[in-house]
Image (cartoon, grey):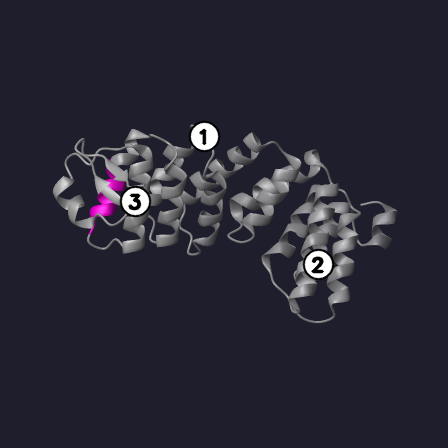
Amino acid sequence: MGLLDIFTGGSGPEKALKLKPKVTQKYGDPATRQKAIQQLGEMKVPEAVSVLLSRFTLTVDPLTTDADEKEHTFELVKSFGKDVAVPPILEFLRTSEQAASWALRLLGELTSEEETITACVSALQHLSAHYTRNPEKKVVLLHHVAGSQDPRIPPTVVPFLEDMSDDVKIAALKALGVFKYEPAREPMLKLLTADETARRVQTSVLSALAEGGFSVEGYREKVEPLLVEPYALGKDQRIQRRA
């Protein structure tokens, strides 16, 4: 630590980390939090990005102030540039259960779509191997990869068909729908025909099976009673969506 550091409260990384309690201060004078955010924005070190990202994990009153602060924080993080900002964002996306949508929005501004999908796949793989109580992050990530044709997505998403949350299952089914990924057929049919599967999940399975063009071979007797409009079973044992 240099002489200047003694008077300024430490080196850049140390000072950034010391500001975290102020950035995440939910109550009290908002000016304290806002000043800390601005100070971090001027530091240009990765640790400052990490602390700024923590602002996205809490909501303060009034909501207009909260929205303004988060947008300002977003712009500050963007200003760090790809080389400095992206590594802490990726770490935040991997480890934080909150604010995944903000991390993805930042990655969308700072990286290519392929790089953002890579980050999503990595985060989903991490989530499938580690228990998390909050399903929101899974849903956000699954929604982000939905519609992408990246071949890494189907094998990453299939395990989420067994998630405890119906919202996660539905998001996984939507992400899988565009792929004709044969290994997903059996898990989808098992989910559709399980006694405990909710009706809205069953409807999403029917949609995914129809979109994927999968046969219900081996499950026909169980599937037929579960068919609802606009879905029907064709002669080739494939789910069809009536026009």
- Looking at the image, residue 83 sits to the left or right of residue 215; the answer is right
Q: Which residue type does callout 2 highlight?
A: Asp
Instruction: Check disc 3 and report the residue beneath it.
Output: 205
Q: Is the C terminus in the top left, top right, bottom left or bottom right quadrant?
A: top left
Q: Which residues are magenta?
A: 186-194
Q: CA distance from mark 1 to mark 3?
A: 19 Å
Indicate which disc, 3 or 2, sits on the residue closer to the N terminus: 2
* Residue 167 to residue 158: above or below: below
Type of amino acid under label 1:
Gln
Element type where label 2 sits in the image = helix
User: Residue 174: percent from the left, percent from the top?
Assistant: 39, 42
Seen as rendered, the residue at the extreme front is: 243
Residue nearest the viewer, comparing 239 with 22: 239
The mark closer to the camera, 3 or 2, is 3
Closest to the observer, 209 or 24: 209
Question: What's the distance in space between the residues labelled 2 and 1, CA to CA?
Answer: 35 Å
- Does residue 193 belong to the magenta stretch? yes
Which residue is disc 1 drawn over?
149
